[in-house]
Amino acid sequence: DSGDSISELQEWRPVIYRKCTDTLWLLLFCLFWAGLMFISGYAVVAGAAERLVLGYDSFGNICGRKNTPVEGANLSGLDMTNKKYVFFLNPCGLEIQSLKISSLSLCVSSCPQEQLNSLEDLQSFARNNGSFLCIYNLNVSNYTLNPKAAQLCPTLPVPPSKSFPLFNRCVPQNPECYSKYASVLISMVNEMDVFHRILSGILAGRDTVIGLSVLALAFSLILVLAFRFIQTLFIHTLIALVVFGLLFISGVLWWLHYDYRNDPSTELETEKENVKFLLGYAIFSTIVTVVLLSLIFVLRKRLQFAVQLFRIVGKIIGRIPFLLFQPLWTFLILIVFWVFWVAVLLSLGTAGTAESTSGGQVEYRALSGICYMAWYHFIGLIWTSEFILACQQMVIAGAVVTCYFNRNKNNPPPHPVLSSISDLFCYHLGTAVKGSFLITILRIPRIILLYLYNILNQKKNAKCLFSGCFYWVCCQESCLSYFNQHAYTTTAINGTNFCTSAKDAVCILSRNSTKLASISCFGDFLLFLGKVFVVCFTFFGGLMAFNYHRELQAWVVPLLLVGFFAYVMSHSFLSVFEVTADAMFLCFAIDMETNDGTAEKPYFVDQELLTFVSQSKKLTEGQNHRSTRPFPDNEDGTELQPMV
C-alpha cells in the first residue's frame, strides 16, 4: 500500500513535455462551430437585419434605402432613400392582431414635432416639411378633398413625436401614448412581458445604461488595483463603504417605494409596475443587508488573516503583472463574440419571404427550420461564452503553477502568461471545451426551468416544483464550476485530460477540504464584498439617473439589468484574485502531499505562505507526521522533471 501511495504522489509533478488532451472534444467543438458558421451564412443570405434596424412600412419598403417590388403589392418597390423614419397612422391605439400590429405604417422624412389636430394641419405639415403622413398614393392636395382621407391619413389628433435614432421610429412624446406605443411595438419582438419591458426601458434610456456600465467598469478597475496593493486600512474602508452602501441603498429603495405609492399622479401602467418592482427590490436589498452585516460581524476577527492572504496573492500577481490584463482581454473577446451573435440572431429572426395580402400590404413568412437554428445558435452562445471563460481560468492557473513550482523565488520564469497561453492553445483547448460543455448542459435546463417558472404564474404547486428544480440545478452548476477550476489547475500541472485531472483534483481536495475551505473562506467573502461594493454604487447611480424619467419608462427592470451587468463586470476582474488564490492553495496541498521539507524533498512553498498557513492553524492539523520546516534559502533540491 505504501508503494502505491508513493507512486500516486510521484504523479503530482508539473510536466515539461506535454501532449494534447481531449482532442476528440476539440474536434467536436470545431464541428459545432462549422454548424454555427453555416447558420450565420444562411442568416446573412436569407435574413434582412436592416429591416428590423432601419424599419419598414406596411407595403414591404425598408425605410432609408431603395427597394425592390413585391408581386401583388402596388405600393412596394419605392425609393425611400430620403424617408428614414417609420410612422404609424394610429400610434396611440396600437394593438396586436395575429402577431401583427393593427395600424398601418409608412416611411416618412421627418416626424411631426407638434400636435396636428386636423387634415389641414397634415396638409400644411407635408408642404412645409416635405413629410407626407398619409398613404403614398394620396396626393397632398387631396388631403382635405378626398372623402376617404380619414381612412388613408393618421388618426387625429396626431401626437407630437420624436425620431428615435437607433431604430428610426417616430416615438410619440405624450406619456400615456408612449407607454402604449412602446409596450405594443416591442412585444412584437418577443411575447414575454419581462423581455419587452427590458427592451422598452433600455431603448428609452440607452445613454444612461451605457454610462452606468462604464461606471461599473471604472469601479471594477479601481478595486483590482486596490486589492493588488492591499493594506489593512483599505480592508476596513471597503467594509465601511459596503455597510454604508447596503444601508443607504435599502433606505433609498424604501423611500422611493413610499413616494411612488403615495403619489396621486401614478396612473400609467409603467408607473404601477415601478411600484411593484421597487417593493421587491427593497425587500431583497433589506434581506441581503441583514445577511451580509451578520456575516461581517461574525468574521470581523479574521480581518488580519484576509490582509495576509491578499498580500500573498498580490505578491504572486506582482511576479506575473500581466495577469491583471487577462479579464480585459477576455471581456473584449466576449464583447466581439456577443456582437457577432446578436447580429446573426437579428438576421436569423428576419429570415422570411415577402408575400402580398388582399389589401395590397406585405407580410413576411418565416422560413421552416428557423426555430431549430435559433436553438442551435442559443446553445452556441452559452457554450462559446463558457469556453472563453474557461480559457481565461486555464491561463491564470497555468501561470500561477509555473511560478509556484519554481525553486528560485527571486528569479521567476520568463513570460509565464505567454507560456501558459502557448500550452493552452497547443495542448489543452480540448480540456477547456469539455469543461465548458459540462457547464452548458446544466445552464440550458436552468434557463428552461426559469422560462417555465415565469409561464406558470397562476399555478402555485407547479411553481414551487420548478423553483426547487431551478435552485437545485443552480447548486449543481456552482459545484461543477468549482471543481472545473481545480481540474484546469490540475491539467496545467500534470498535463492530463479533463476526467483524469478532475479525479485527481477531487482526491486532493477531499483530503484537504476542511483545511483549504476554511483558509480561503474569508478571502472569497471579501472578494464578494468587493462585488457588492461595485453593484451598490452603480445601482445608486442608476436610481438617481432613471428616477428623473419615471413617467416615460419602466426603468426598474433595466436597472436590474444594470445591477447584474455591474456584478458580472466586477466578478470578471476580481476573479483574477479568486482563481489565483484557488490555484495557489491547490499547489500548496500538492506540495505538502509530495514533499516533506527535507533537503532531499524540499517544499516549493515560500516562507511567507508557509508562515501564514501555520499561523492560521488550519492546514497543519493532521500533518504532524510531516515536517513543517520552511523552505530553505538555498536552491538545492530536485528540479522539475518531465513525467515518465
Image (cartoon, rainbow, N blue to C red):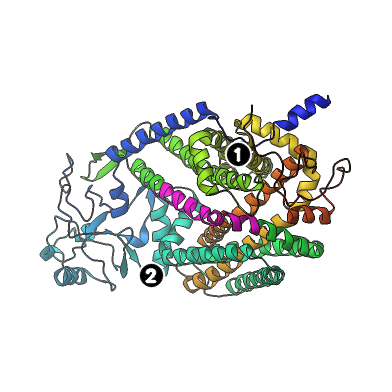
Locate residue 70: give its quadrant: top left
Locate residue 437: give its quadrant: top right
Q: Are marks 1 and 2 in contact (CB under 8 Å)?
A: no
Q: What's the magenta region?
A: 315-339
Q: How many residues crowd mark 1 within 10 Å: few (<14), some (14–19), many (20+)?
A: many
Residue 628 sits above or below residue 84 on the image: above
Identified at 53% across, 68% down, the residue is 542
- Determine whether the residue tagged by mark 2 lies in a helix, strand or loop: loop
Amino acid bearing label 2: Asn
Which quadrant is the C terminus positioned in?
top right
- Determine whether the residue tagged by mark 1 lies in a helix, strand or loop: helix
Residue sitting nearer the eye, 433 or 68: 433
Residue 118 sits above or below residue 426 on the image: below
On the image, the x and y values in percent for residue 565 come to 53, 57
State the residue position of label 2: 174
* Label placed on residue 492: 1
Identified at 51% across, 63% down, the residue is 217
The answer, for residue 156, to whether it is visible in the render is: yes
On the image, the x and y values in percent for residue 228 come to 62, 62
Q: Nearer the viewer, mark 1 or mark 2?
A: 1
Residue 283: in magenta span: no
* Label placed on residue 180: none
Left or right placement of residue 474 versus residue 42 in this view: right
Residue 324: in magenta span: yes
Residue 368 sits above or below residue 486 on the image: above
Left or right placement of residue 491 versus residue 210 in this view: right
Identified at 80% across, 41% down, the residue is 596
Amino acid bearing label 1: Ala
